[in-house]
Image (tube, rainbow, N blue to C red):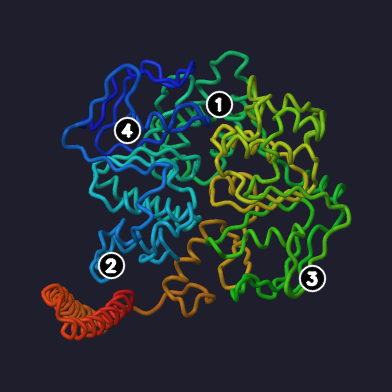
């Protein structure tokens, strides 16, 4: 297997801190490498050096002369005056790019709801990121480097992306991915690189295999690594108890894994937690009766009746814009329903983690902001913990303890926000995208706290791994005003969404096996497509001729006016034919 990129004795740092220390490694054709590590340990720096964007302090980077590298960075893409169509499709009309099933699938799945003729400058940050992802994936590259590709994607889009990348890598595409989405890493990666303390530790397999090998390494580590070892072993135990697909890639002996986790208890005793939750919360938490809620003429909740009890651990999924955050804010009392009632238990002490971090004072110091809330707290396990010890477990040590909150990174602010929420000792936790900007080590710490959480937990997240890890039941907002139970979890949600796409007119109907397709109808559809493509080709040619004639008649205003009218008519005809082509292609 030929190497596309090689690093030889590469060293790089910022200030006095060395992020990469004498690193020698490479990326070969067809390899899919997931890069993990704590925020600030050098993952993005490594990608920038590998792609030639950043020169290392020492060492050599060799990129094969024939290698084409596509990069999705955390920077914005395109120029503000360009349209989305110009950036990703070089301005091609719909009937041209949509004729390619792979391109059509990428655009419709990852840019759903984004008008291709919108200017880049009018897009939100999340929309720009999605445009950048599609631009990279549509390119003809040998190596694709993706920095947090699942950011701003919902569960359905992440599942599509994983399937698309798996197919591309089977065809020989090499890929490097930085992501905190562990389900995604396990679905697409064949190797994991852990960046820490200036070195890179490489592991064969996906995320599950990485956890297994990491446990073995930590078992042999010094005593001061005991805390991280226990967290990783606990996560491995959960992985081994989960669906077989999670552990399909490990190359290590399963017997050794079973020995390592033989003394690890189940993540949580749900019966005991529910009994404790009932004692603390009483019998009622939330009772929604006939709740209706709309925004801008769109119905997000339609006559929703739902009872949420003590100790319930609920994961909530849905496409962007389906109303997940609105539902959480209704439960938290930050919004009022248009109709219906929401009854809240009298003993509720609510903790709400929003997607924003505006409630933090940028001028405050980390330790002071925590001590001001509470210097000592009792965790759900009964353990007394000081604010300082909790800060250390959440990665705040040394200078970070006295740092201004305004100087913290997005991930650090998110960690602090969650820690402050724990210190308030709530008995109901509502978490809106809690995994945003967090590295995997921090996520395992949070999951460990939530494992023994005895109250009611409601989580909205596009991180499928996190949802499956900390919740016991899943619900979905399907975008039609309904909130439905998913006995089969996220897999059932994805199946429902596929059924809705296949039969949009009967989205609420159960999935059934229909009769075989009519061969005559299929032949007619192909004929219609061929006819429409022929007509589009003629209209395209006519429009080009009109543009040439208009250039030649620039000084003849009467002729120019006549040609302009003719051009408008031709463009209208082109739009009608493109719409007809798209409808016929999707039948």
Using a 10 Å C-alpha cutoff, classify the residue at mark 1 as few (fewer than 14 neighbours), some (14 to 19) or many (20 or more): few
SS assignment at label 2? loop
Q: Which mark is residue 98?
A: 2
x%, y% of residue 497? Answer: 48, 66
Q: Nearer the N terminus, badge 2 or badge 4?
A: 4
User: Along the horizontal axis of the image, is 383 left or right of 191?
Assistant: right
Q: Which residue is mark 4?
A: 53
Residue 576 falls left or right of residue 409: left
Q: Which residue is pictured at 52% across the width and 77% down the height?
A: 509
Q: Is residue 288 above or below residue 38?
A: below
Q: Answer whether labels 3 and 2 touch (C-beta < 8 Å).
A: no
Q: Nearer the viewer, residue 515 or 229?
A: 229
The local crowd at label 3, few if under 14, some if 14 to 19, many if 20 or more residues have their Cα within 10 Å, is some
Discs 4/3, front: 4
Q: How far is mark 1 from mark 4, CA to CA?
A: 45 Å
- The Cα atoms of the two marked residues, 3 and 2, are separated by 46 Å
Residue 260 coordinates in the image, percent (x, y):
56, 26
Looking at the figure, which quarter contains the N terminus?
Answer: top left
Q: CA distance from mark 1 to mark 2?
A: 53 Å
Distance, label 2 to label 4, CA atoms, is 33 Å
The quadrant where residue 424 appears = top right
Instruction: Report the mark closest to the observer, 2 or 4.
Output: 4
Q: Residue at x 61, y 64 (%)?
A: 323
Tag 1 secondary structure: helix
Residue 341 is labelled as: 3
Per the image, the residue denoted by label 1 is 259
| Nearer to me, 221 or 570 | 570
State the count of labels: 4
Say which label, 4 or 3, has the lower sequence index. 4
Question: At 57% from the left edge and 35% from the top edge, which residue is drawn?
Answer: 409
One can see residue 53 in this view: yes
């Amino acid at each position: 297997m030929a190497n596309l990129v090689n690093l030889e004795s590469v060293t790089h740092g910022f200030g006095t801190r060395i992020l990469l220390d004498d690193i020698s490694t490479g990326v070969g054709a067809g390899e899919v490498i997931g890069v993990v590590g704590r925020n600030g340990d050098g993952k993005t720096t490594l990608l920038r050096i590998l792609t030639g964007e950043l020169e290392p302090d020492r060492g050599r980077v060799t990129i094969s002369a024939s290698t084409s590298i596509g990069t999705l960075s955390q920077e914005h893409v395109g120029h503000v005056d360009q349209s989305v169509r110009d950036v990703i499709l070089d301005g091609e009309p719909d009937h041209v790019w949509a004729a390619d099933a792979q391109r059509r699938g990428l655009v419709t799945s990852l840019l759903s709801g984004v008008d291709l003729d919108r200017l880049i400058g009018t897009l939100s940050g999340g929309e720009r990121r999605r445009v950048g992802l599609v631009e990279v994936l549509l390119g003809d590259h040998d190596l694709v480097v993706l920095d947090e590709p699942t950011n701003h994607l919902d569960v359905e889009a992440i599942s599509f992306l994983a399937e698309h990348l798996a197919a591309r890598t089977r065809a020989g595409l090499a890929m490097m991915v930085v992501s905190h989405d562990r389900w995604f890493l396990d679905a697409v990666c064949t190797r994991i690189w852990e960046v820490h303390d200036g070195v890179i530790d490489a592991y064969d397999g996906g995320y599950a295999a990485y956890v297994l090998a990491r446990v073995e390494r930590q078992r042999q580590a010094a005593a001061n690594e005991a805390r991280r070892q226990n967290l990783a072993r606990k996560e491995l135990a959960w992985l081994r108890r989960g669906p077989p697909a999670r552990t399909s890639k490990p190359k290590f002996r399963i017997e050794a894994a079973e020995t390592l986790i033989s003394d690890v208890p189940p993540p949580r005793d749900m019966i005991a937690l529910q009994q404790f939750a009932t004692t603390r919360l009483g019998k009622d938490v939330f009772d929604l009766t006939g709740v209706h809620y709309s925004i801008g003429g769109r119905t997000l909740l339609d006559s929703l009746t739902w009872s949420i009890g003590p100790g319930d651990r609920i994961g909530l999924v849905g496409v962007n814009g389906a109303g997940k955050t609105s539902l959480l804010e209704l439960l938290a009392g930050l919004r009022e329903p248009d109709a219906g009632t929401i009854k809240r238990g009298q003993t509720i002490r609510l903790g709400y983690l929003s997607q924003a971090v505006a409630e933090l004072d940028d001028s405050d110091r980390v330790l002071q902001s925590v001590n001001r809330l509470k210097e000592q707290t009792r965790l759900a396990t009964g353990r007394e913990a000081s604010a300082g010890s909790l800060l250390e477990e959440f990665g705040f040590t040394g200078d970070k303890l006295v740092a201004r909150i305004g100087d913290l990174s997005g991930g650090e602010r998110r960690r602090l926000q969650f820690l402050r929420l724990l210190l308030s000792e709530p008995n109901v936790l509502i978490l809106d995208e809690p995994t945003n900007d967090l590295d995997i080590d921090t996520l395992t710490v949070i999951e460990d706290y939530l494992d023994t959480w005895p109250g009611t937990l409601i989580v909205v997240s596009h991180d499928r791994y996190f949802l499956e890890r900390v919740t016991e039941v899943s619900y979905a907002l399907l975008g039609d005003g309904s909130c439905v139970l998913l006995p089969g979890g996220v897999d059932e949600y994805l199946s429902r969404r596929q059924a809705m796409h296949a039969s949009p007119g009967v989205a609420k109907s159960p999935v059934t096996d229909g009769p075989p397709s009519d061969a005559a109808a299929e032949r007619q559809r192909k004929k219609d497509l061929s006819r429409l493509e022929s007509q589009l080709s003629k209209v395209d040619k006519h429009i080009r001729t009109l543009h040439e004639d208009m250039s030649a008649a620039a000084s003849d205003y009467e002729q120019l006016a006549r040609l302009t009218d003719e051009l408008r008519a031709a463009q209208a005809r082109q739009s009608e034919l493109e719409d007809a082509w798209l409808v016929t292609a999707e039948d």
